[in-house]
Amino acid sequence: MSSDALTAPRLRFADDRLWTLMRLLAGAVETQDPSTQLYGDGLTTAIFALVGSRREESPAARKGLAPWQLR
């Protein structure tokens, strides 16, 4: 996945799973317990995995081989 795919804006994007993970992460940030860092790391990983998997499902991602791959 290119960095352009992650930084390109998406209009009308909403995902209940993503919002739930973001709320959990926001709550973990406010906790002073040091063990919460591992929990936050796991939530961050889940968020990136969810966003990354949605990008791969997009029609633009299924264009086929790049010209340099065809050569």
Image (spheres, rainbow, N blue to C red):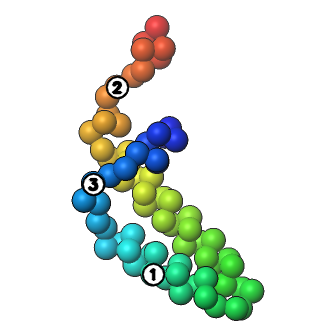
Look at label 1 and name its amino acid.
Answer: Arg
Mark 2: few, some, or many residues within 10 Å (few <14, many ≥20)? Answer: few
* Nearest to N terminus: mark 3 or mark 1: 3
Secondary structure beneath dot 2 equals: loop
Q: CA distance from mark 1 to mark 2?
A: 36 Å
Say whether disc 2 or disc 3 marks the residue closer to the N-terminus: 3
Residue identified by numbered label 3: 11
Circle on res. 55: none
Instruction: Describe residue 53's horizontal placement relative to residue 38 as left or right.
Output: left
- Residue 64's disc is 2
- Helix, strand or loop status at disc 3: loop
Q: Which residue is mark 1?
A: 23
Q: Residue at position x 49%, y 82% from top?
A: 24
Mark 2 belongs to which amino acid? Gly
Secondary structure under the numbered disc 1 in the rendered image:
helix
Q: Residue at x 61, y 82 (%)?
A: 29
Percent across and percent down for residue 23 are 45, 81
Q: Earlier in the sequence, mark 1 or mark 2?
A: 1
Q: Residue at x 53, y 87 (%)?
A: 27
